Amino acid sequence: MAFDIDMIKKVYANFGSRVEAARKVVGRPLTLSEKILYAHLWDGDPKKAFSRGTDYVDFAPDRVAMQDATAQMALLQFMQAGRPQVAVPSTVHCDHLITAKEGAAIDLPHAKTESAEVFDFLSSVSNKYGIGFWKPGAGIIHQVVLENYAFPGGMMIGTDSHTVNAGGLGMVAIGVGGADACDVMAGLPWELKFPKLIGVKLTGKLNGWTSAKDVILKVAGILTVKGGTGAIVEYFGDGAVNLSCTGKGTICNMGAEIGATTSTFGYDESMERYLRATGRDEVADEANKIAAYLTGDDAVYADPENYFDQVIEINLDELEPYLNGPFTPDLATPVSQMKTEAEKNGWPLKVEWGLIGSCTNSSYEDLSRAASIANQAIEKGLVTKSAFGINPGSEQVRYTANRDGFLKTFEDLDATIFTNACGPCIGMWDRTGAEKAEKNTIVHSFNRNFAKRADGNPNTFAFVASPEMVAAIAIAGDLGFNPLTDTLTNDKGEQVKLDPPTGDELPTRGFAVEDAGFQAPAADGSSVEVLVSPTSHRLQLLDPFTPWEGTDLKGLKLLIKAKGKCTTDHISMAGPWLKFRGHLDNISNNMLIGAVNYFNDKTDNVKNELTGEYGPVPATQRDYKAAGIGSIVVGDENYGEGSSREHAAMEPRHLGVRAVLVKSFARIHETNLKKQGMLGLTFADKDDYDKILEGDTIDILGLTEFAPNKPLTLVLHHLDGTEEQFLVNHSYNAQQIEWFVAGGALNIIRREAAA
Ligand code: SF4
């Protein structure tokens, strides 16, 4: 599981000179984000300044991380690329496919049996191609990466949107689709539009009940789910230095919830402490040698308005704890106002479950602070009024927290200790009674709270908070409980108050673990057989997509005009569908089943233009495919926000959708569509969304002259015989147009490998 110190030394050897070269070409002091970006150019030393938000740039990431759900498709694609080994250090983490129900002792063996063929595939394909493999139960990808692989100034991509968590250790770490990961593992450059920069100046120090989580809950309230789109959020100031490394990770983690490309912090003593505590003295020593380059220039932080596209300032001394939700992570309510807001909005005050865990908040520090609240509850004669569940972030955290008594404290409060895995955070939660779809409230320390996310129940009102606040609210069983001011009645009928949490940034006795759950790859994998059964329902080797036919697209059917929020969860639902992540045809049966049909406000119910009947979206599309008719999906703002899963792009491609036309795209999803050879288009005039009518047949014109910055034309043939046409934009550059022409980026990689 060893971090790759030789790779890190190589990165650092060039870091200073590349930053100096970047300063020259840019002609001014640099932010940390710019230093890392310019130090990772595919072409080596910076030779020109890039325009933020405009220029596409090729980068050379240092690492790739993949979780089990997305790794399946990423590695099935990699197998098609024709390369013998991965070109950069890469890891696979088995964390998404483990259902939380009874507790780790029962759930983990069950998952290992239930998903054996997937884990065997991932283990064997990792073994063959030189990839580190973290077994089920080893922990959640982003905690394991932070504990083992993240390093200051590094650049990483990962097939999960919360890859950004590694910004807590000063990386530029970005969530991508499996196709991007496949490129980088195949030794190709990774392309990204040079991001804009948002600076967040933190002053003061967290105190009382306020935690690092509240910083990002506050930022999410300010910037909203779209406010960080296309930008790196860089935190700085004395308040940043005062935060722990894992606290920084929490803040960066939820940068995904504001749509940010990533978030990062400059190298400081908290990172050094964390590196040393996690057995990486060598990395800390190397980082110390170039420390001045691993943070933004002083002049930038002294006058941030001149260097960032937007600046936000937060005084940690004054920051209140927040509860964000329900149904969106940017609806930020200070805990002190929650009772009023909940009553006003009809949010159920009774809390059914308190859940602590997820990659966002499952560090040793998180568990120690939550345990301090649990401990007080026991000492003060309180019990939890809500059910209570804990997912430790890694086996190392679990083992150490167990040794230090935290898990026993939680269990004494009747908490269930679930597996070191995602569990309820990704809908892998077999929650008793969820199928009744009753209106209810849960609080959790996760990052996302979209409808149905945790338990599949659209009427579960989920609120996001810090682990210590989740513990306090679970004990009170009341969403309106404010531990700063309110008292609770104990078993003697006395009024007692919870004191603010205490905890340890790092274990005073050091981390410990018996078996971290790592499998190193074979030194020579050429004779290793990759295990994929031809009769499997969960894994399917891929066939290449067909190239573009060379003509305009005419006679497309409107498959669905999606209304409002359409996240990747709506396009390719998680939960029970996770088990088909390695089988494109089977998982395509969930395509767009969560999207709301504009014309009838129903989900998974669209008009089949061949039969005139209303039916499920996937079945309707399969009818069009069988008839050899292409189709188009229309969507609203920020289409495809949420996760990096390329299934949301591959499923429509596999089933014969030809284009997705929306008011605006979430970045990762737009790139994923392009990689799969799909057309991702945006309305030149957003009001044209209203012109799309049920039953429209649609032509896309201009493809024979498809070129960067050149709009295409959309022609609508309405059912009443009238026609309308308007311009649609695209953001394809020359290379992305080649992907479209070839039928997908992978077709080009394979061609090049064979040449
Ligand atoms: Fe797992 Fe949730 Fe983190 Fe995603 S956000 S990696 S599902 S814990």
Image (cartoon, rainbow, N blue to C red):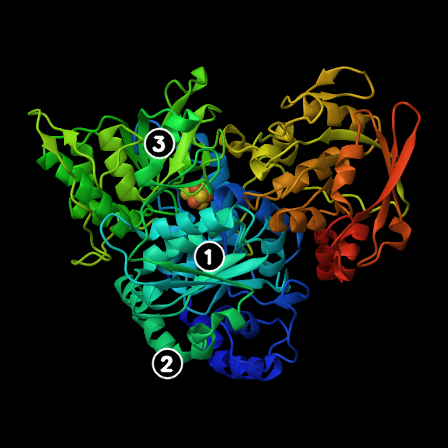
Q: CA distance from mark 3 to mark 2?
A: 52 Å
Residue situated in front as seen by the camera: 367 or 739: 367
Residue situated in front as seen by the camera: 37 or 752: 37
Which of the 4 quarters of the picture holds residue 61?
A: bottom right
Place of residue 620 in the rendered image (x, y in percent of width and height, measured from the top left): 74, 23
Q: What residue is disc 1 on?
A: 522
Q: What residue is disc 3 on?
A: 340
Q: What residue is disc 2 on?
A: 289
Q: CA distance from mark 1 to mark 3?
A: 59 Å
Q: Earlier in the sequence, mark 3 or mark 2?
A: 2
Would residue 423 appear left or right of 10 to someone viewing this image? left
Amino acid carrying mark 3 in the image? Thr
Q: From this viewpoint, which residue is outermost toward the right? A: 721
Which of the 4 quarters of the picture holds residue 151?
A: bottom left
Say what secondary structure mark 2 lies in. helix
Amino acid carrying mark 2 in the image? Lys
